[in-house]
Amino acid sequence: MFDKPAIRHSIIPEWVRQIAHIVGQIMDGKTNNTGTVTLTAAATTTTVINARIGTGTGIYLSPTTANAATALGTTYHSATTAGVSLVLTHANNAQVDRTFNYILVG
């Protein structure tokens, strides 16, 4: 793969630097698979759009408001479109502050 020592020495340190940076970011919790979603008021579903969603992706919600904490027990992941979105099904009410932080896994 590396014919000349000059190429070998110029490429490998850059790869090492990039890998070290990525690992450092992961160790700091920067895994680039998080977001925020607010459940749609006066509806029974909310769509989360994220290109990282796959067929086996799980979404894990952390409520950030009291109304979100109440809604957590009746909110579930009901459908997935790989590479595009997933659907959360929830109770239909007028609350506009049912906001969650989320993490996508898988």
Image (spheres, helix red, strand yellow):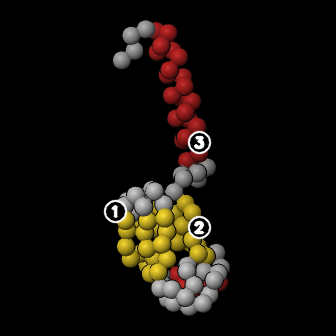
For residue 73, say whether it is visible. no
Going 47% across and 13% down the picture, which residue do you hit? 7
Mark 1: which secondary structure? loop
Determine the residue positioned at 54% across, 22% down. Answer: 13
Q: Position of residue 43 (x, y in %)?
A: 51, 86
Q: What separation in Å lies between label 2 and label 3 (alpha carbons)?
A: 23 Å
> Neighbour class for label 3 at 10 Å: few (<14), some, many (≥20)?
few
Three-letter code, disc 2: Thr
Q: Position of residue 28 (x, y in %)?
A: 61, 49
Instruction: Name which residue lies at 60% across and 90% down.
Output: 94
Of badges 2 and 3, nearer the viewer stands 2
Indicate which label's residue lies in the foreground, 1 or 3. Answer: 1
**In the image, 31: left or right of 89?**
right
Marked residue nearer the N-terminal end (1 or 3): 3
Specify the quadrant of the image occupied by residue 53. Answer: bottom left
- Upstream in sequence: badge 2 or badge 3: 3
For mark 3, what is the residue? 24
Distance from the alpha carbon under mark 1 to that under mark 3: 28 Å
